[in-house]
Amino acid sequence: MSRRRLGQGTLFVVAMLFASSGALRLGSGIGAALAKADAEPAKDPTTCEMPSALSAALTLREERIGVQEASLKDRLAALALADAAITKRMEELKAVEDELKSTLAVADGAAEKDVQQLTAVYQAMKPKDAAALFETMSPEFAAGFLGRMPAESAAAILSGMSSEAAYGVSVIVAGRNATVPKD
């Protein structure tokens, strides 16, 4: 057992020598580092001098960005002008469209009034005279007038027409609402 203790003691002494050697080396390095740090004055990062090539490159980049910004401002101004012009033109077109709708409504009203008046004239004619006139009209045109008349007047005119002409007009009057949706 004494040999064993003797071996343990030797190992302990060797380990302590290694540890003290490392501590001495570490301690001497710290001292040198501290001495070196005290010898060099600290530099302010804001006062660092940039290399001239880097400075020139940054200046050139700043100029390019300035040109791009000016170009973008010009484009935005042009787009704003175009937008204003388009808005103005749309308002003008809307006004013209409203005026056109008004004119068309007046024209449609006038045309409707003319058709109503002409229908009244045909209705007031003697059925035999009106029938002779309706025979000379195209069947579609004649059907338009007969469809607007009261049934009695239309029947009197149809009875004065030839059977072929009366049939053609009747088919058109009967079929003009056939394609209207039922739902």
Image (spheres, rainbow, N blue to C red):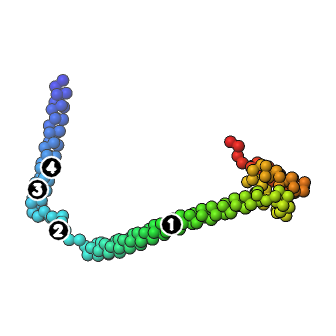
Mark 2 against mark 3, which lies toward the viewer? Answer: 2
Mark 4 against mark 1, which lies toward the viewer? Answer: 1
Numbered circle sitting on residue 26: 4
Query: Separation of disc 1 and disc 2 at Cα?
Result: 67 Å
Task: Describe the element under mark 4 as helix, strand or loop.
Answer: helix
Q: Are marks 3 and 4 in contact (CB under 8 Å)?
A: no
- Viewer-side residue, 65 vs 18: 65
Q: Residues within 10 Å of mark 3 (few under 14, many from 20)?
A: few
Query: Separation of disc 2 and disc 3 at Cα?
Result: 24 Å
Q: Residues within 10 Å of mark 4 (few under 14, many from 20)?
A: few
Q: What residue do we see at 11% from left, 56% from top?
A: 34
Residue 167 image offset from top left, x and y in percent: 87, 53
Q: Quadrant of the N terminus?
A: top left
Q: Can residue 64 be seen by looking at this rendering?
A: no
Identify the mark nearer the N-term, 3 or 4. 4
Q: Residues within 10 Å of mark 2 (few under 14, many from 20)?
A: few
Q: Quadrant of the C terminus?
A: top right
Q: Can residue 116 be seen by looking at this rendering?
A: yes
